[in-house]
Image (cartoon, coloured by chain):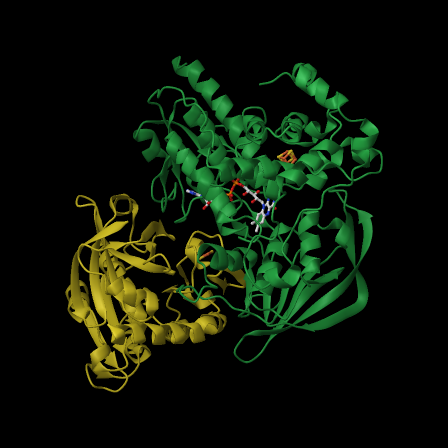
Chain colours: A yellow, B green
């Protein structure tokens, strides 16, 4: 059981939780994630470790309430405990001074991008972050990203905030403007696919952090498998970060769709519960 | 430990042998394990085998002729004192029989249920040589262990005075649990670290409730707790804490029982389609995450036409689970013939009773899907048996031009597992085989790094519960000896 010691709302769907986990705080590096389970009937879901405080023995999770399990987690209050928390999992992000790095994120990928932006900056990179969402209300973590990056470009599909256009329009603008050494992308698979297609055209090395379905997170089940460079890889142990130009995004998209119907049913259950109060 | 011939010469045993003629004993037909009706049980998760009644157990015990040189014992990897416990059942001393089992086996209620007896103890029973059915050793073992558990008077073994020496166990499967049990008896301060949120390893996340109820395991785990073993779940050695951390915290010995957790796939076209998964994923969802329960947040596909690829226990468990989740056609697809199937005979028999379809001498070569990427068909190649291979099993060869397309909406791949790479990857200097298993001294279970011992599937590849348990006990005895030699602990 890991106690929540502070909580902050970034928006009504995004919260920051600081959780007691001294061993994980000590062992983790940027890019690592944890598996979390809320309640005895809870599901095991992966979440990137956004930050850690070794002295306090805490880790920080930024939770975007998109599904049943993330919503249950996001609704926990200070003093509550997370039923199960295990990690750190996955391979740490490879951080060095690459030069200029474009970080392209959107949707579910915004929170996990935060610690990567911080680590890249600390290593001396010039970091340009492109933050995208469908519409103004869905832009999250803008202030945090702005303070960590050298430049922040906000994109909305409908033009309700920042620049009108997709994340790729924002990235392309930078690629046309200056020399970029690396692109990092985290977000919905479809978004990463198009960022990857774009940077391939420009020959910019690109890293994608994949958010596949997971069960155990330790390499035991194969639920998280993806094809990278023609080979099957397990995202939880071989990843989560891969050379984006080698990832078979179409297959990944197809596999992610597998449990859509279940998730819809569960969300309906949850909203019913909410109404019943 | 008892001296076999001395025990056999005790007056009660002699008298018992003389109370009935060998011929009469041999004439009793083998007991049939009472089980749930196949139609009824295929719709729920209740344990299939009901266990012997005391009357049936005593009658079955009479079939054992109490051989002077009990060959059955040589078939048991941990050399259980088989005739002794059986004769104790015959005279109604069921609790004593359970004690006899526990002298060599840490988990008799589990082994009585899951051991491949037909290849081990029962294969060596004297009755087999005379063309008769062997004594039902496994059923009797289960009977005695269940009797003790259900009586509520579990004999908690004596624990030596604490010696304060800290010992770490990696993994809580049968290897880790049996190691922990013995070490705590010797007086060590034992902590078991488990990566998952539940204790029990494959016994919990793999083997289904209808074959091995969780209660049976939980009683054993609580027993260990009562004896002083500490458990730490959600803790991965090599990630959450390192071997160095353990050393720094004063642990003087580590036993690695991290199992064979890595699922193998077939590497054929279409294998990543939606609806195709490893048996580890399928069974973990259903057993560990309780996904079939509507209350559970974890989803699981409930296929109507389910093919399970493989012929081992894991395949049988998966296909029978699929049936219980509502499959109309639950199929085993296996590339050899039924005779070569590594699964326990009883499981194959139960699966058939329940209506599982057996497609043997068939090997999938490609999976086909629809626009959503969901699997819809499977192409299988017909096979025939060729020459025996290294394992002594006749190896299957393709029958040219003979393929068949089968409709499926879910496929479970159950073609074996590889050693869990977490520990091998994170501990420098550990000697590994080319299969990724940890190399140990076969006598002592000690690795190249003196303070690290290992056993179970991480050493053997996918093996059995009884072998894992035997390794754990062997490692405990030799680690104890090693530590005594090192520091003069007694
Ligand atoms: C579905 C299925 C059915 C089976 N049926 C039978 C049967 O009928 N009869 C039979 O004899 N055998 C059967 N087996 C095989 C048997 O279960 C195994 O041989 C046995 O469980 C191996 O025991 P173990 O202790 O070595 O490992 P496991 O039971 O695999 O336990 C290892 C544990 O270690 C944990 N772990 C791994 N790495 C770490 C780490 N770094 N830190 C902390 N924890 C870690 C894992 O999470 C796991 O809980 C079956 C196996 C399966 C999968
Ligand atoms: S432990 Fe297994 S092999 Fe040994 S006697 Fe029992 S059933 Fe037979
Ligand atoms: S989540 Fe199970 S293997 Fe990656």
Q: Position of residue A3 (x, y in %)?
A: 22, 51
Residue B379 placement: quadrant? bottom right
Task: Give left or right: position of A139 versus B272.
Answer: left
* B446 and B61: which is toward the camera: B61
Would you identify the image quadrant in which residue A39 lies?
bottom left
Q: Is residue B342 visible?
A: no
In the displayed structure, would residue A81 be above or below residue A257?
above
Q: Looking at this view, is B472 or A59 the one in front?
A: B472
Q: In this image, B166 relative to B110: left or right?
A: left
The answer to which image quadrant residue B7 occupies is top right
Left or right of B50: which side holds B215?
A: left
* Residue B130 appears in the rendering: yes
Name the spot of residue B219 as percent of width and height, x first. Answer: 45, 40
Choose between B126 and A206: the one closer to the eye: B126
Q: Quadrant of the C terminus of chain B?
A: top left
Q: How many dots with numbers? A: 0
Q: Position of residue B90 (x, y in %)?
A: 66, 30
The answer to whether A216 is drawn above or below residue B177 in the figure is below
Could you tell me which residue is drawn at 80 percent across and 69 percent down? B401
Quarter of the figure that contains the N terminus of chain B: top right
Residue B114: x, y in percent? 61, 44
Q: Quadrant of ligand 2?
A: top right
């Amino acid at each position: 059981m890991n106690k929540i010691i502070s909580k902050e709302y970034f928006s009504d769907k995004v919260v920051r939780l600081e959780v007691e986990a001294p061993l994980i705080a000590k062992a983790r590096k940027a890019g690592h994630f944890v598996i979390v389970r809320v309640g005895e009937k809870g599901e095991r879901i992966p979440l990137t470790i956004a930050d850690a405080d070794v002295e306090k023995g805490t880790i920080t999770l930024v939770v975007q309430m998109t599904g049943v399990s993330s919503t249950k987690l996001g609704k926990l209050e200070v003093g509550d405990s997370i039923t199960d928390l295990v990690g750190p999992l996955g391979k740490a992000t490879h951080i060095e001074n690459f030069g200029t790095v474009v970080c392209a994120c959107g949707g579910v990928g915004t929170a996990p991008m935060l610690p990567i932006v911080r680590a890249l900056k600390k290593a001396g990179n010039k970091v340009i972050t492109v933050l995208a969402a469908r519409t103004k209300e869905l832009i999250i973590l803008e202030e945090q990203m702005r303070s960590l990056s050298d430049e922040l470009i906000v994109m909305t599909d409908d033009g309700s905030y920042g620049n009108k256009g997709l994340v790729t329009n924002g990235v392309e603008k930078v690629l046309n403007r200056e020399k970029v050494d690396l692109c990092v992308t985290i977000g919905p698979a479809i978004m990463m696919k198009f960022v990857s297609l774009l940077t391939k055209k420009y020959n910019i090395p690109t890293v994608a952090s994949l958010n596949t379905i997971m069960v155990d997170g330790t390499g035991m089940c194969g639920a998280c498998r993806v094809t990278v460079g023609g080979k099957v890889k397990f995202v939880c142990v071989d990843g989560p970060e891969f050379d984006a130009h080698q990832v078979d995004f179409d297959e990944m998209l197809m596999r992610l769709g597998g449990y859509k119907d279940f998730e819809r049913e569960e969300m309906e259950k949850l909203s019913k519960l909410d109404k019943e109060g | 430990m008892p001296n076999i011939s001395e025990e056999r010469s005790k007056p009660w045993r002699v008298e018992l042998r003389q109370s009935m003629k060998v011929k009469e004993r041999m004439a009793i037909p083998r007991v049939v394990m009472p089980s749930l009706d196949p139609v009824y049980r295929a719709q729920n998760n209740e344990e299939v085998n009901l266990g012997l009644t005391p009357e049936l157990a005593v009658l079955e015990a009479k079939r054992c002729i109490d051989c002077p040189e009990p060959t059955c014992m040589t078939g048991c990897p941990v050399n259980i004192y088989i005739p002794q416990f059986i004769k104790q059942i015959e005279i109604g001393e069921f609790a004593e029989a359970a004690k006899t089992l526990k002298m060599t086996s840490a988990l008799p209620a589990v082994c009585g249920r899951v051991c491949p007896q037909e290849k081990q103890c029962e294969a060596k029973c004297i009755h087999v040589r005379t063309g008769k059915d062997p004594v039902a050793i496994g059923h009797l073992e289960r009977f005695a262990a269940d009797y003790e558990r259900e009586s509520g008077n579990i004999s908690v073994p004596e624990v030596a005075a604490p010696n304060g020496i800290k010992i770490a166990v990696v993994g809580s499967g049968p290897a880790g649990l049996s190691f922990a049990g013995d070490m705590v008896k010797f007086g060590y301060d034992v902590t078991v670290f488990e990566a998952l949120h539940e204790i029990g390893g494959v016994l919990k996340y793999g083997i289904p409730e209808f074959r091995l109820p969780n209660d049976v395991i939980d009683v054993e785990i609580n027993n260990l707790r009562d004896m002083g073993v500490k458990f730490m779940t959600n803790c991965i050695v090599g990630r959450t804490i390192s071997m160095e951390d353990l050393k720094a915290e004063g642990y003087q010995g580590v036993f690695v029982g991290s199992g064979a957790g890595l699922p193998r796939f077939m590497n054929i076209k279409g294998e990543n389609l939606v609806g195709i998964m490893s048996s580890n994923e399928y069974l973990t969802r259903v057993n560990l995450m309780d996904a079939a329960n509507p209350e559970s947040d974890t989803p699981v596909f409930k296929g109507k036409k389910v093919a399970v690829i493989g012929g081992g226990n894991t395949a049988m468990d998966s296909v029978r689970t699929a049936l219980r989740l509502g499959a109309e056609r639950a199929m085993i697809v296996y590339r050899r013939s039924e005779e070569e199937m590594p699964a326990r005979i009883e499981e194959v028999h139960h699966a058939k009773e329940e209506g599982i379809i057996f497609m043997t001498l068939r090997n999938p070569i490609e999976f086909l899907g629809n626009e959503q990427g969901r699997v819809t068909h499977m192409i299988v190649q017909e096979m025939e048996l060729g020459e025996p291979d290294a394992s002594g099993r006749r190896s299957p060869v393709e029958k040219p031009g003979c393929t068949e397309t089968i409709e499926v909406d879910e496929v479970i791949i159950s073609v074996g597992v590889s050693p869990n790479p977490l520990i091998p990857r994170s501990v420098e200097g550990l000697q590994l085989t080319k299969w990724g298993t940890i190399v140990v001294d076969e006598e002592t279970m000690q690795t190249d790094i003196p303070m690290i011992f290992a056993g179970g599937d991480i050493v053997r590849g996918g093996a059995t519960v009884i072998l894992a348990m035997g390794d754990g006990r062997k490692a405990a005895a030799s680690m104890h000896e090693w530590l005594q030699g090192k520091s003069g602990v007694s």
